[in-house]
Image: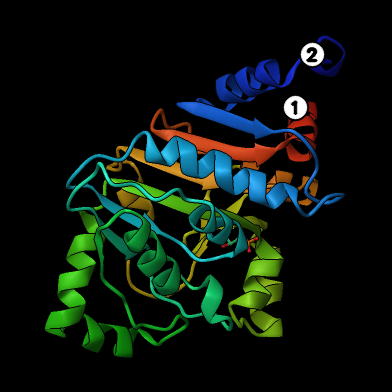
């Protein structure tokens, strides 16, 4: 199909943007699976895009993960914006402190001369514990800020991989599979038709908040993430996708 007619990456960007009904698509040349240094370029591209869309007084929510980490690491120091607040999109600590949303929030706040708040709530807690936690004043305050966020920067993962990372049991991983989960973003697992089939129990941003955001920037690269990326499409004009050429060309084959 399309692949034969394509002349340049800007055309690929345009095709994906139309297909996913997004505000913008940025494709970085190269393939992160063949050249890991492309991850840095993804980070730079997303950071520069985000930078030009952040205004004084904004609340920015970020998820964890290595791709969002690259965005934050490559974020330029900005002095022209005031009073930005950065918050983790959801609870969940993960195993590595460097890629946790709390850590990334603090780092981004520093680059923006802003402030940050942390949410110290692990994932996979029982409903009972979550209900008790939400009643805590400090937790309530941060949850309120998270729901007020107008910009979200998030990663997308493959369902099984994310399930494992988030410590699901063999039985739960099998359930995820049976539910047809292919992709994961901000704690939601999506099937190939973009239905949310499983939600990680924790606090923070939920799927209903997504439509209220002025801007949400997904950063996900690598051919192996194409099905996951496609599963999370929500045909939302406030959405932006930053990806690599490897994933973009594979994605276009699905169109
Ligand atoms: O939610 C998805 C994951 O955060 C993606 O993680 O960027 O390390 O692949 P990653």
Q: Provide residue 198's location: percent of width, then percent of height.
A: 52, 64
The answer to whether mark 2 is within 8 Å of ligand 1 is: no
Q: Nearer the viewer, residue 33 or 115?
A: 115
Q: Nearer the viewer, residue 230 or 148?
A: 148
Q: Quadrant of the C terminus?
A: top right
Residue contact between numbered discs 2 and 1, judged by CB atoms under 8 Å: yes
Q: Is residue 3 above or below residue 74?
A: above
Q: Nearer the viewer, residue 30 or 135?
A: 30
Q: How many marks?
A: 2
Q: Is residue 127 left or right of residue 76?
A: left
Q: Provide residue 238's location: percent of width, then percent of height.
A: 38, 32
Q: Secondary structure at mark 1?
A: helix
Q: Which mark is residue 252?
A: 1
- Residue in the image at 84% along x and 15% along y: 1
Report whether residue 205 is seen. no
- Residue in the image at 19% along x and 48% along y: 82
Q: Which mark is residue 150?
A: none
- Residue in the image at 59% along x and 54% along y: 156
- Residue in the image at 87% along x and 49% along y: 34
Report whether residue 47 is seen. yes
* Circle 2 residue: 6
Quadrant containing ligand 1: bottom right
Q: Label 2 crowding class (10 Å Cα cut-off): few <14, some 14-19, many 20+? A: some
Q: Secondary structure at mark 2?
A: loop
Judging from the image, the colouring scheme is rainbow
Can you tell which quarter of the image residue 7 is in? top right
Q: Is residue 95 left or right of residue 250?
A: left
Q: Outermost residue, left direction?
A: 137
Q: Is residue 121 above or below residue 87?
A: below
Q: Provide residue 151's location: percent of width, then percent of height.
A: 33, 46
């Amino acid at each position: 199909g399309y692949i034969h007619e394509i002349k340049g990456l800007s055309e690929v960007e345009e095709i994906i943007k139309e297909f996913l009904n997004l505000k913008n698509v940025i494709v970085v040349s190269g393939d992160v699976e063949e050249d890991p240094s492309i991850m840095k370029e993804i980070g730079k591209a997303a950071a520069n895009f985000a930078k030009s869309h952040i205004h004084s007084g904004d609340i920015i929510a970020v998820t964890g993960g290595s791709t969002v980490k690259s965005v934050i690491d490559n974020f330029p120091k900005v002095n022209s914006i005031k009073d930005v607040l950065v918050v983790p999109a959801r609870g969940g600590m993960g195993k590595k402190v460097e890629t946790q949303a709390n850590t990334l929030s603090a780092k981004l706040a520093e680059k923006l001369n802003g402030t940050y708040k942390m949410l110290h709530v692990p994932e996979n807690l029982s409903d009972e514990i979550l209900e008790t936690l939400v009643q805590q004043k400090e937790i309530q305050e941060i949850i309120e800020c998270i729901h007020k966020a107008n910009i979200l920067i998030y990663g997308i993962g493959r369902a099984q991989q994310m399930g494992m990372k988030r410590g699901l049991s063999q039985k739960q991983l099998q359930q995820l599979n049976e539910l047809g989960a292919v992709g994961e973003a901000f704690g939601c697992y999506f099937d190939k038709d973009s239905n949310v089939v499983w939600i990680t129990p924790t606090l923070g941003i939920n799927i209903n908040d997504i439509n209220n955001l002025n801007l949400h920037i997904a950063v996900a690269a690598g051919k192996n993430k194409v099905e996951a990326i496609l599963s999370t499409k929500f045909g939302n004009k406030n959405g932006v996708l930053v990806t690599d050429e490897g994933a973009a060309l594979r994605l276009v084959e699905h169109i």
